[in-house]
Image (tube, helix red, strand yellow):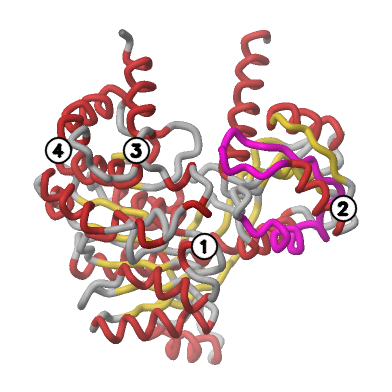
Amino acid sequence: MNIETLYKQTQDYLYSFVDFSMTRAVRYSPEQFDLKRMVEFSHFLGDPQKSYPVIHVAGTKGKGSVSAFCAGALQAAGYRVGLYTSPHLVDYAERIQINRNPIPHHELVQLVDELRPYLDQGTQLTTFEITTGLAFWYFARQGVDVAVFEVGLGGRLDATNIVIPKVSVITSLSYDHTQFLGNTLAEIAAEKAGIIKPGVPVVLSPQKDEARHVVERVAVQQGSPIIEAGRDFMFAPLSHSFAAGQILQIWPKADQLYLNEALARGLAKWELIQLTIPLLGYHQIENAATAYAALKIFNIDGLPVTDVDIQQGFSQISWPGRFEILQNAPFLVLDCAHNRDSASKLRLALDDYFPGQKVIMVFGASEDKDIQGMFAELLPRVGRVIATRSYHPRAIDPQEVVELADKFGRPAHVVERVEEALDEALIKADQEAVVLVTGSIFVVAAARDTWYNHRKIENTHG
């Protein structure tokens, strides 16, 4: 039997356990997430997560980008870096990476085969918990120097939350997964702040006051120093373009007085750290500043990482599906925005990079998402909606998307298959409009795969 067949069977085995991400959320409650079984599983594996320093990243939006920034800088510093993120865009193995290389399929098959006797004893572990344990174990067996773990859901009861990191990070907080995390921003912030460990520094992205106050209160209770991007590390955008990405300046608050004096006296340009990032949109400026602050704190009690390392690592970062521009004439933009706040940031990015241009939106989302809130942000900027559906079992009926778009006064129709929806959108754009694919990581993944497959076919025929 070839390795890809074995790999597919291994994925099917992993998905045979409870997988909350693939199930209609109304059937479950937060009480079903329990760290006790994760602690027992980790003990069985030998507590591998204790064998390397960790950066732990939670948040509603931006946590994947911040994790990637941190991993990129640490790799540029010469370290062997584990990176654990979710969900995957194309391949399950993307979730577990070393130096940005996904775990080889044959190694994942081998790890799972070794665990089957334990897992087959009637464990109540979920798919995500097993995958998290595999990441802990794989990184230890491969001798990583450091690992960056992105929280899957929430924070307090997330499977990753048995780590004791050198620094905790909480990125932008907004409304998402409210059926699990709470209906107010304060409740959501309290769940996310559950990753804060006693005495461990926590780095915070710019936040709304309601969320920031909760995180600050928890940090005080835990005796954890709190460092805020935009307060303790100041930052400002310098430039942005399709070709060059974005450039920002960043400096510690302690230098602000000297900077003000230099500017007031008209002295030579103050030497501030400049960071170049390929990722587009102002929200990525905030993410880069957050990651920079986290790395500066990690530098104190984790591993040495210099500004040069950070500059190099950030400049080489890749994070597909986040305001990713695949082509021009017509422009094709993919973005995994899946709540109102991220939709608002997406609209700002559209205004920034495509001012005044018409937008045709290919949209599909999960039924538990705030689609009305997303449409309130996006549809004033969109001329036409093509409603589609991913393979995901929680995907909303596209006809409901059409009916909602109609309430916003926007023409919409259904094209069930993502591949056909993308083709139609590109034809209708006719090099004049921007085609935007958004609403769900699963829709974005399908569109991205379709586009790349078309290129392969064209190259083969060419």
* Amino acid type, mark 3: Phe
Tell us which disc is closer to us: 4 or 2.
Answer: 2
Depth check, front residue: 304 or 125: 125
Q: Which one is in front, 29 or 153?
A: 29
* Residue pictured at 74% horizontal, 63% vertical: 377
- Disc 3 on helix, strand or loop? loop
Q: Is residue 107 visible?
A: yes
Residue beneath label 2, please? 406
Q: Is residue 316 visible?
A: no
Question: Is tag 4's residue or tag 2's residue first in the polypeptide sequence?
Answer: 4
409 versus 17 height, above or below: below
Residue 118: % across, % down: 16, 36
The x and y percentages for residue 78 are 24, 47
Residue placed most toward the observer, 321 or 39? 39
The range drawn in magenta is: 369-397
Question: Which residue carries the number 1 mark?
Answer: 179
Query: Closer to the N terminus: mark 1 or mark 4?
Result: 4
- Badge 1 density bin: few <14, some 14–19, many ≥20, Cα 10 Å: few
The amino acid on which the numbered mark 1 sits, given as a three-letter code, is: Gln
